[in-house]
Image: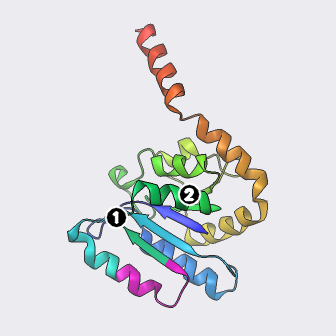
Amino acid sequence: MIVSVGRFNGHYNVKKQDILIKVFIEMYKAKKLSGWNLVLAGGMLSTDRKYVEKLNEMSEGFSIEIIPNASFEKIQSLYGQARLYWHGAGFEETKPEYMEHFGISTVESMASGCIPIVFAGGGQTEIVEDGINGYTWKTEKELADKTLMAMSVGNMMSKKVTQRAKDFSKNIFNQAFDSLLTSL
């Protein structure tokens, strides 16, 4: 399973779920994702219902599930089941406010062993070191190519991913913050 977690937002389309669906369908049609499915989960406001309907229409006939307003428990379960994590925020954007500023869902997925394949922009590049503990991409082709790479490395990278997620733990944050305050 490939999972992506992020708010469904039809107005700004910040998380780029439509692009993720497009790439998944292209890979599926090219017979590169036999036995794989894509799950998109996240919050949805009533104003975003039409966008989610559009995503459902795009997904029709393919192994894609869209879960609006998924509970935290459901999202944790998805992380536990998935092998790969996709994130598209920042793709084709030039304004920093449309980039992923940190990417907590990326770190959460990594803590469960998902190999992240995230857009190479914003805070994602602070989390994922391309080819070491996940992959970064800038084009749709790179997303597809790096997904195939991640599928082939599997468990070898999964351990590095889990270890990297620990760098963002509450304890590490508190230690760094305390150190900063002490230095002031």
Mark 2: secondary structure:
helix
Give the mark nearer the N terminus: 1 vs 2: 1
Q: Is residue 38 above or below residue 180?
A: below
Expressed as whole percent of the image width and height from the top left, the position of residue 99 reads 40, 53
Q: Say which residue label 1 marks.
A: 69
The one nearer the camera, 167 or 184, is: 167
Segment colored magenta: 54-64
Q: Residues within 10 Å of mark 1 (few under 14, many from 20)?
A: some
Q: Say which residue label 2 marks.
A: 79
Residue 59 is inside the magenta segment:
yes
Residue 107 left/right relative to 67 = right
So how many labels did they put on this image? Answer: 2
The one nearer the camera, 75 or 127, is: 75
Q: Residue, x 46% and y 46% (percent of image)? A: 104
Tag 2: amino acid:
Tyr
The one nearer the camera, 81 or 137, is: 81
Residue 148 is inside the magenta segment:
no
Which image quadrant: the N terminus? bottom right
The quarter holding residue 152 reads bottom right
Q: How is the image coloured?
A: rainbow
Q: Residue, x 59% and y 67% (percent of image)? A: 2
Q: Residue furthest left?
A: 47
Tag 1: amino acid:
Asn
Asked if the residue under mark 2 is in contact with the one under mark 1, i.e. CB atoms within 8 Å, the reply is no
Q: Visible in this render: residue 88?
A: no
